Each structure stands twice: as C-alpha cells, then as structure tokens.
Image: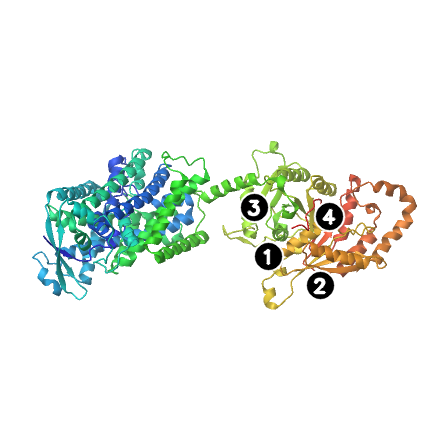
Amino acid sequence: MMSEKTPLLHYRLTTSGEPSDGSKRTGVRGGVHAGRSKDRAPQKLGVLFGVVIPTLLSMFSVVVFLRIGFVVGQAGLYHSIAMFLVAYFIITMTVLSICAISTNGALDAGGAYYMISRALGPEFGGSIGIMFFFANICSSALYILGLVEAITSTFGVPEEGAAAAAGHHHMLPSGYWWSLLYGTALLFLCFIVCLVGAHIYAKATFIIFIVVMMVLASIFISFFIVGPTVVTLSHTSAVNTTSMSTANYTGFRLHTLEGNLFSAYTVDYTTGAMMSFTRVFAVMFNGCTGIMAGSNMSGDLKNPGYSIPRGSLAAVFTTFITYNVLSLLAAWSCDRYLLQRDYSFLGDINILPPMVTVGIYSSALSAAMSNLIGASRVLYALSKDDLFGGVLALARKTSQSGNPWVSVLVSWLLVQMVLFAGKLNTIAGIVTIFFLLVYAAVNLACLALEWASAPNFRPSFRFFTWHTCTLGILGCLVMIFLINAIYAFASIAFMLLLLMLIHYLGPISNWGYISQALIFHQVRKYLLMLDVRKDHVKFWRPQVLLMVANPRSCTGLMTFINDLKKSGLYVLGHIKLGLLDELPSDPLQSRYDSWLCLVDHLKIKAFVNLTLADSVRHGVQNLLFISGFGGMRPNTLVLGFYDDCTPHDHLQGHILLSTGHSFDMVCPTKVPGEQRSPFFPSLRGAEDPKDLQEEEYVSVIADAVKMGKNVTLARCFDQFNRDRVLGSGRKIRGVAGPFIDVWPMNLLQPDSHSYVGICSLFLLQLACVLHDSRAWNQARLRLFLCMEAGYSLQEKEEAKLQGMLRDLRISARVQMVAWDEVVALHWQRQRERAEQNEEDEREDCNQTYPNNASQLTDEYICAVNDMICRHGVPQPAVRFLYLPHPPADRSRYRAYLHQVDLLSRNLGPTLLVHGVTPVVTTDI
C-alpha cells in the first residue's frame, strides 16, 4: 500500500468542537431548532436521538481517525490506557456536574453560558460566555482549515519536489490563497445551512452518525480481515525533498504487542517537536471533550431529567471503550514505526481505504458547522441578557421562524476573519484552554449550588457530591496548565478582565446571585460560632446603632460613624411612627431599597434596620432589643443632639449613580395634586413640631444605659465635611492633619478629678479608634486634663496620665488646663446655698448622677464651654466630651438636657460620650 503523509490535522483537529450552543437541537453537534414556528408543537426527543447521538459525534471527532496511532506510538499501550483513565475521570466528574445542573430546570439558549450565568451570576457567566463564543469561533475555523488540508493532501497538486508521488487524482491547485478560497467556500456552505435554519442540519444528523458508525465498523473489521502488509510511507522535508520508507502491519502478533507496551517518545514528524507525556496527553485529551452536546438539548427532550444523565454517561462510556479497544488493536497489530510515522494508518489498512477519508471529511464538516451554530447561539444569548448594553443589540434580531440570523452572520464573518490566519497551531491550544475553563466553570457552578444548600437546588440527578465537583475543577485546571502554562495564565487573566468589566459596567440582573446564597450560608455558620460568652475586653470593638430621623440632614454624621466603627457592626436605625393595626400593609417594605441605595451612594458599610412604633422611645427600645444576631449586636447607641437648629438638606442636587435619579425627584401620589419623593421625605421646617419632646429624648438615653449600652450624642455634624477635613490634598500641600480633642473628665462635676473611670476610658478608646482608622491616621490626639492651679498633685497626676497612655499604647499630646476661675464660680454658688441644700446633698450622694448637677449654674457651664473653646486652637475636627449619667428623677430631665446643651454649644462637631462597659486593657 502507498500513502502520502503531510502535516495533516495535527493540533488543529484535536481541539474539541463543543456544540454547546445551548439552543434546542434535535441532531448532532449543533443541529439547532432555532426556527420553529410558534404554532407548531416542537418534536420531543428521547435518549438516543436527543443525547447519545449528539454527544457521541461531538466526542468522536476526527481524533478517532487520526490520533489513535499517534498516542499509542508515542506513549505505548500502558501509558495510553493510563492517559484515557485520567482523562475520562476528569470528563466524568464534569459530566456529573452537567447532569446535576441540567436536571435542576429547563435550559434556555446559550448552553454552558446559560448554566454558568444563572448559577454564578452575570459577571462570571458573561466572561465565560464571551470566552465560549470565541472558542467556538476559532474551533470552527480550525476544523475548516483542517478539512482544507485533508482535501488538498488528497486531491491537491503536490509541490515540485514531490511530483513523482503525484497521482491522477491530484488536480486541485495548492497554496495559501487557494486554501483560503477552499476554506471560504466550505464555510459559506456551513453559513447557508445555519442561516436557513439549523433544522436542516438536524435532518442530516442521523445520516452523519450512520456514516461515522460505518467507518468505525470498517476499521474494527479491517483489523481482523486484513493480513500482514508492508506500508510504504513518503514524507516531504522542509527543503521539499521526498523520502520513502516502509513500515509493517503485522496483524495480531504477540511480539508486536510486547514492542508497543511501553513508551518511546520521539519527534513528531508533522511538527518536528519532541513529544513527551504531557504533550501527548494534551493532544489525546482533546478527543475526549464535547460532553455538553446532550445537556444543551434539555428543551427538546421528552424527559430531560431521565435523558441527560443516562445519555451523557452512556456516550462517555461508549467512547471510553471505543478508544481503549482501538488502542489495544493498534498496539497488537502495528509496529511502532508505522504508528509513529503514519497517523492515518487506519486508511492504509482498511478494507475500503476511502471510508476513513469519508469519515474524516464528514466529521470535520460536522464539527465546523456545529461550532458555527454554537457560537451564534451563545452570541444570541449574550445579547438577550443585555450584559454589554447596546454593543450586541443587533444580535438579538431573529427571523420569523426564530432563527437569530444576525448572530449567525456575525459569527460567520468572525470565522472568516480567523481563516485569514491560515496556520492556527498556536490558537488551537488557546481554544482548548477556553473549553476547559468552561468545563471548570460548570463544575464550579454545581459546587457553589451544592455548598449554598439552597432549598430550590433539587436536581433529579443525585449521583454527585461536592467532592466530584472539586475533582472536576482541579482536573480541568491541571489540564489547562499541562497544555500550555503561558496560555493558561493569559486565558485566566482575560476571563478576570471580562469579569471586572461586566461587574462594574454591566446592568444588575434579576437571576439571583449564588454569591449571596454562599455568603448567607457562611455567615449563618460563623454567627452560630460567635459565642457571646467568649467575649473579652481585648477584642472589644464599637458596634454602633445610629438613629436617623431623616438622612437628608445627617449624611455627615453617617459617614463619620462609618470611620468610627473600626470594622465593627454598623446599623442605621429609623423609626416610622404609627401602628400596624391602623395601616393596610407594612409601610417599611418599600423603604428598604431607598435606604440601601443611600448606603451605596455614601459608600459606607452599614446595615439598615427600620421599625414601626407608636413612639420614638418604644422604637429605639425595639431596635436595641432586636438589632444584630448572636455576638454581633450593637453595644453603642448614637443619637443626634436635641436642639432647635433648622436641618439642612445635604442630599439636594445629588444623583444616585445606580439609577441615574436625583434625590430631589418627586412623584405623584394617590392624593390628587400631592407629590412626594420616592427616596426620603422633605425636611421639617422651623415651625414644624418635632416627633419627640425633651423628656422622651432623655428617656431614650436612660433606657439605653439601663440596657447596658454605651450612649453617644452627636452635635453639629451638619457642619462636618469629611472631604474638607480629610482631603487627599493635605499630604500634597504639606498641611498638618486635623486635631481630635478629648476632654475625659466630667466637666459637670467640678469636685471630681477622676479621668480613669469606665466612662472616661471609653471616651478615650473611641477617640483612639477614630485616630487609628485609615482615613484619620494623619490626625493628632490632644488630651485635656483640668487641674486647679494650687492642686498639690498636679505633676504626679500628669505623670500618671502619661504612664497610662503608654500602657494603653495611645499616642496623644497631654495638655494641662487650669480652671480655677471656672471652678470658683461653682464654689461661690455652693457656699451661698450650702445651708439650704445640705440635706439634699446627702441624698444626692446615693444617686448615680453627679451629686452637684442640680446646683450647677448656667454661668458656670457657660464658663466651661468658653474654656473648651479657648483651648481648642487650632479648631479641632471633632471633640469628645464626657456625657454625665441622666438623673434618676424624671422631673430633672429638662434641666439635664439644658446643661448638656450649654456645655456643647458652638463647639463644632462634638461627641458627648457616656460609657458603661470596660473597653481597654493592658494585657497582651
């Protein structure tokens, strides 16, 4: 026998032609029912025609005809079987994931893209979808070029140096432009079929399958019928000289089998590259792909939950047996030289040599058409999901029969562009890696669904676990790097780039995000592990509940508290006054979106908790009781200050980027002529009454203290401008950081010199937490300690305070403040009323509020306020002041609030802090 060998379909035809278009198909490798009329009931397929045949043809590409000899000749029988075992183990793990996902619901157009995007979200699905689209485009071009090489090898006019080997059938001109012309003609034929309708290809599916099966049957029969034969080989060298050699087909001989058991890696005669285990494994693995053809047809199956698992597994098992039996027969009957130097030896030893050629042509053409259809359907699915805005808008157009003709046209043009490259050995490796990334993503989608434990993930196929998904992912990733590590890194980087682009530029989908389910699952698990009984002061952090009446007036405070939380819990609380009994439905459900949009707009990390109550006091109690879970509960309540200042709208003129709407937008209501903002109501006017009175406000403070919560009152934060205080230009301009002033003493108890109590240390800790946050690390702490000029222990107290700061690892500048004149005002008042209030003072000593609070005069408090102002030069960004305990007597609530008001008036942004829990320690 005479055979003429050329570099025929080596790496090019080893790339899988995955028919994963995800559209509804009745035939093989991409026969898609894209053009069903709406008034005609679609024909449903069973296991054989719906799953087994498409998957078999996808996995039986030309590799079975051209690469069995290559694998056995280079790797030997033992290594070949080991390769098939490893490859099919990876494939089987992926098939199990495909069966699980495809039996959890009907699939729409897009196949693998649809499965991945609906499971992992639009970012992951869109990036994989784009890669899948380009993989199908390049794969279609690869098969077209491979088919052209096969045709020109058989019928083309040989080079001048090989003219002696020419036969009467060598009539087609050769060369780059002629090959491009042949490829264009074949591609145009595929394009016409896809443009008219994929159902035309579906009708030819069974015929193509019969042809391939007949070729395989002839190959198996030939091994037993054809006797020993000497095969003459001819090879054209790089200098266009032809060399002749012979090799033996021995028939079934034991010595032939023994000679082919072990590996003998040598130079590949088609590429000149030295082969190795990994290179041969990479080429062989491509013939095992194509496993998603059946799962993509779930919409056309009578019973997808029954057909896909059985059909896919049956096809995988059949191809596994076929490849291994062919490897055994080849190793048993062909000597090593024939296997290594004649990759198309199956045609040379066939009883009907043209049969193998027919099988190669039909497989290549079927694969090219399948990938062209698959690419168009993936593009159509991407355009329908609108992940790339108007870029793919035209691809959504379909014919009257439903065929996405624009997507087919675009795919055809892109394949035509790839054909101009002519030689695509390097692209073939990238295409294979793209397909493997898709398989890894399918395994990842199934793993994520399994780990999320979502109640609605109930696939009828249950023969999978998270172990099989993990093994599938690892197997695909290992194969990616075995094929080409550089291409693998480049492909993963390309996928991550697409993922980032879609994440930041793509629209929000309503498919459901598996990330949310996984986060919920993990958060619940770790919240259960967060044991409040194991809390320790060393790991204390502020967990804040900030009460917000109307966010329009307190955006500055909301951003400030975000800096203060130190990675702790941050909850925005809001109370709507009313009773559910008097309302037709819950009025808060529709408000959550507005609050969450505000959180995104301000770029703060906060939860939102809204409640309905008959009073503000009861609402705050409800939120303090129910906010948080387990060990994550608010330990600090932050309230805006109760004063008569007119609120200012800080959201006026701001645009919400996620929707493009302004916070000033108004919409008509059910009441004729009335309009309201869909976000937040307008601010109250100066004449409008407040929702709570002074006594109720102080009662809220007292309730929080009773419940063991620290309390902070925030005043004048409508004047706080974070960008101005912490502007990024400070370092560039060389401007010093802002000051944080801390007054740890109870200034409303002038006879006390204590600054190491629980409340004082809590105040100091909060100031330190703010200073340690990333945005405030350039700020400088100033600690003010009030002493009387004649106090004998002044130096000792200062040294003691400095030592305490060192022990607490707090960097602050201590300033001693002489307040003799201020205290004198108080003691003068005390002497005048000493006799009258002696009994009251003895009673007050047993109370928890400052024993001098009821005797403090406005003159004294104003003097303290003036002292704070005088020592606040330069003006600090924020002040921390000691907030006294509210009085036990409710009749004194107004006086208490009045004193706090005078103390903090005109000081700029100020926090009045009352701490009830230990928060600092000197232990390691």
Task: Categorize mark 4 by other alpha carbons within 10 Å: few (<14), some (14-19), many (20+).
Answer: many
Mark 1 lies on a secondary structure that is helix
Tell me the residue that label 1 is attached to. Answer: 774
Task: Single out the mark in the foreground, 3 or 1.
Answer: 1
Task: Single out the mark in the foreground, 3 or 4.
Answer: 4
**Mark 4 is on which residue type?**
Cys
Tell me the residue that label 2 is attached to. Answer: 874
Image quarter of residue 699: top right
Q: Residue farthest to the left?
A: 168
**Mark 2 is on which residue type?**
Pro
Vertical comparison of 756 with 305: above or below = below
Is any part of residue 242 visible from this angle? yes
Task: Single out the mark in the foreground, 3 or 2.
Answer: 2
Give the mark nearest the N terminus, 3 or 2.
3
Left of 1 or right of it: where is 197?
A: right
Marks 4 and 1 close (CB-CB < 8 Å): no
Q: Give the CA separation, mark 4 to mark 1.
A: 25 Å
Q: Give the CA separation, mark 3 to mark 2.
A: 37 Å
Q: Residue farthest to the right?
A: 835
The circle drawn on residue 595 is 3
Image quarter of residue 107: top left
Tell me the residue that label 4 is attached to. Answer: 759
Left of 611 or right of it: where is 715?
A: right
* Colour setting: rainbow
Give the mark nearest the N terminus, 3 or 1.
3
Q: Residue farthest to the top?
A: 581
